[in-house]
Image: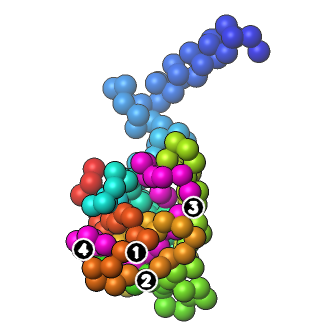
Amino acid sequence: MCAHARHVVFAVLVAALAGCGSSGDLQGLKGIGAYEERDPGLVAQLHSRSSAVTGAVRVYDYREGVQIQLAVTNLMPGSYRLALHERGNCSSPNLFSAGPAWAPPGSTKSGADLLPGFTAGQEGQVSGYVVYLKGVRTSGPNSIKGRSFVIHYGDLVGEAFPGQPNNRIACGVLVDGKAIL
């Protein structure tokens, strides 16, 4: 299809979809899946006291668990691990306050091995990390709300001790996504 024909098809499609809504809004598109308001889920705003690393972890209910999405910038190139931690506290300089890595009751994996690792390339950004975690929810009895996510440098989710260096580089506490919007 030539470029002109594609523009014509696009213009016709836009005009047809515009007619679906009332008063020019997108309400008419909700039923066809092109525009859906998404539950804001939970969000952990990642930050670091020792580096420029920033980002966010978004968590949405999905099937019998949650979908976890990570977007982070200003990483040094290399391997990293994302881990869910017991406490929602990122106040200590070495992130010891987040507590140990956590796994849901009945999980066949430890908290340190629960989520797969990822790699940051030369640009220092990661945005395609999406993981499914079964057995937890964003609210209710199996909620992970109030826990923290920690990014660990390297291939291991290491322990932390007060006042001692470790491989924890960024942390964020899971809060209601509506508070962030």
* Amino acid tagged 4: Ser
- The circle on residue 159 is 2
Mark closer to the chain start, 3 or 4:
3
Mark closer to the chain start, 3 or 2:
3
Work out how far the residue at label 3 is from the one at label 4, CA to CA, in angstroms.
23 Å
Q: Secondary structure at mark 4?
A: loop
Q: Which residues are magenta?
A: 69-95
Q: Which residue shows up at 61% across the image and 88% down it?
A: 108
Q: Secondary structure at mark 3?
A: strand
Residue 151 % position (x, y):
44, 66
Location of mark 3 (residue): 79
Of marks 1 and 3, the one in the foreground: 1
Snapshot quadrant of residue 159: bottom left
- The circle on residue 92 is 4
Q: Residue furthest top?
A: 4
Left or right, residue 158 beside residue 55: right
Work out how far the residue at label 4 is from the one at label 2, CA to CA, in angstroms.
14 Å
